[in-house]
Image: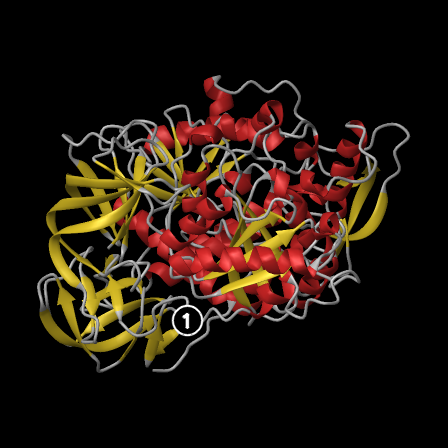
Amino acid sequence: MNTTTQLLRFITAGSVDDGKSTLIGRLLHDSKSIFEDQFSAISKTSEKRGMGAVDLSLLTDGLQAEREQGITIDVAYRYFATPKRKFIIGDTPGHEQYTRNMVTAASTANLVVILIDARRGVLTQTRRHTYLASLVGVPHIVLAVNKMDMVDYSQARFDEIVAEYKAFAAQLNLHDVTCIPMSALVGDMVVDRGDNLAWYKGPALLELLEKVEIDHDVNTTDFRFPVQWVCRPQSEEHHDFRGFAGRIEAGEVSVGDEVTILPSGRSTKVKEIVTYDGKLQTAFAPQSVTITLADEIDISRGDMFVKASANPPKVEKAFEAMMCWLSEAPLDKNRKYLVKHTTRTAKCLFSSIDYRVDVNTLEKHANPAVNMNDIVRVSLKIQQPLVFDSYTTDRATGSFIVIDEATNNTVAAGMIA
Amino acid sequence: MSIHTLSHLDVLESESIHIMREVAAECKNPALLFSGGKDSIVMLRLAEKAFRPAKFPFPLVHIDTEHNFPEVIATRDKLAADLGERLIVRSLEGSIKRGTIVIKDESKPRNPFQSVTLLETIAEFGFDACMGGARRDEEKARAKERIFSFRDEFGQWDPKNQRPELWDTYNTRVHNGENIRVFPISNWTEMDIWQYIGREKLYIPSIYYAHEREVIRRNGMLVPISDLVQPKPGEKVEVVTVRFRTVGDVTCTAPVESNARTVDEIIEETASTRITERGATRMDDQTSDASMELRKKEGYF
């Protein structure tokens, strides 16, 4: 393995019945990412439970609390690598808390694998998973039509499912959708192609995961640099050093570029791009760097550096957003909450709650109460101006979380319209 | 407009730097837990990358079981001194003297007691955030823990009631007396750590490299002979060429047979090993299927 492999983050959506755990187990097993001690532990458990073969789904079994209750809590992260790429899987359980968990796991994913059972076809939950993937802006979607062994590996059945799914996906403006027939149980089209799906000419799942182009998953054009930390050594050696540390969330920047500091609107030039490994001429998303400027300007955490571009950010004290409510306590319209957006945290009020989206039917319901797992369209008023983009332009500067000041809990995740 | 591609190590490094800067900016009184082990040595380099040319905006803290390998403690002191950063060491002996830890058997691992001294140290200095070098690939309880892991005043982790963590927007808020554990290298694997040690040419304790050591074989593991571990009647002491994949309590950390004497050789071995890091080396994780989960619920890292 070399050190220049890329990292791909993906999640799997589907219920246990669709063979989700078996699929993850199969990916790990066939890519030789399961260790002997893990395998012997699940072999023992399979035997104890009276199963004939080793149950690969046990690999994703987690905590004692879960085993006792036979459920999966929350999101678990798993790691594997092939010579071509490193992978992080966000594994989410498929029970009733699904919306909250899937939104959480999908927020950092490049790709989602939506699993369906070839016998049952496109179901309500398939539509729900697809809608949530589109809401959170996951760039690449794979429809894994699993259990093809149960429908005699029928191409006609696969084509029928794909036609129905693509019609639905088109309504959601999803562009990169790949449909793969497979049998996770038998091992067809997961890592190996197997012998049963010769009519299928597209990539097997792992091949796709290794090849899908992810360089454009971040916004490469509109430079955005939220200031995280002001670096002032105040030592003899670096007496006058004043650098602005942060991560480039979008685009790129070079020494000499003119940048505008928002919300103040003052402009200056980039003097240096400093890193521990030396100064850079150009830096780009998602690098963490420290920038020094040609002029002394009063700048603090929460400010954002931008460059002139065709898509300037908005600097406003109000915006509209789609939001997923994550908390057991419902939204209280009369209360103030905190919004954390990039590196700025400010008080906010919900000035209107326009509608709730039924994630199963995509119907809109007006004037809703907002409970856990609800997806709602809201208008927010913020105590101070935020520098933001629409979520579809930039995931990093178009997203925010809502915090309840009384409990300090994260109660909602929002995507700016 | 050119297209840039970062390697997985660059992406992981940038993510970790971003996390450390969030901690420094948003937490009132953070600390970096530093033991002299390989993961915490990687954390030190990441902190240098996040904050140089300035000093770290937090002290280094070690909770010393006094069951450590001498090479690791020497590395701890050397690296802290080389960097010119403040190192706070609090020992389990202090808690034992205060009576908050009662040791029944000196030869037993002290890991379970580390939580007590850690919580006492957090209270002594009023730390509201402790950064640690735990990784999600180590263990299944860690696989489900957030990067910013909220703990109540007893230091307890409640796996069923974690704050949702979305994008890279971290909720760092706590009430007085509560604290968060932060794991900036959550998404790194054992392989990533070794590749990074190689790339950054990091100094690590010599016992990570293959060396000859007196061991006995117990329950399929190699147990190193030390003042605290002596052969029982009938056990045979052998000299074996070994290296450590993890370094913890001397009574419960087992080395693996290995001839890997350089980082490159370790990387090669890591790529072909068929046993997980903790599975091969931690006797205390094998006492029950849920050992780590239970320890975390009691305030462990």
Q: Indicate whether B52 appears above or below B90.
A: below
Q: Residue at x 22, y 33 (%)?
A: A405
Q: Nearer the viewer, residue B103 or B192?
A: B192
Q: Indicate whether A239 appears above or below B181.
A: below
Q: Nearer the viewer, residue B175 or A213?
A: A213
Q: Nearer the viewer, residue A124 or A336?
A: A124
Callout 1: SS: loop
Q: Indicate whether B113 appears above or below B46.
A: above
Q: Indicate whether B272 appears above or below A127.
A: below
**Horizontal side, residue B126 vs residue A344: left or right:** right
**Horizontal side, residue A190 vs residue A129: left or right:** right
Quarter-wise, where is residue B175 in the image?
Answer: top left
Quarter-wise, where is residue B4 in the image?
Answer: bottom left
Residue B149: x and y, percent?
Answer: 42, 38
Q: Work out whether residue B100 can be spotted.
A: yes
Q: Nearer the viewer, residue A220 or B114?
A: A220
Judging by the rendered image, the residue that carries numbered circle 1 is: A216
**Horizontal side, residue B262 vs residue A383: left or right:** right
Residue B83: x and y, percent?
Answer: 41, 58
Q: Residue at x 20, y 55 (%)?
A: A301
How crowded pointer 1 is (Cα within 10 Å; few <14, some 14-19, many 20+) is rated as: few
Residue B134: x and y, percent?
Answer: 52, 45
Numbered disc total? 1
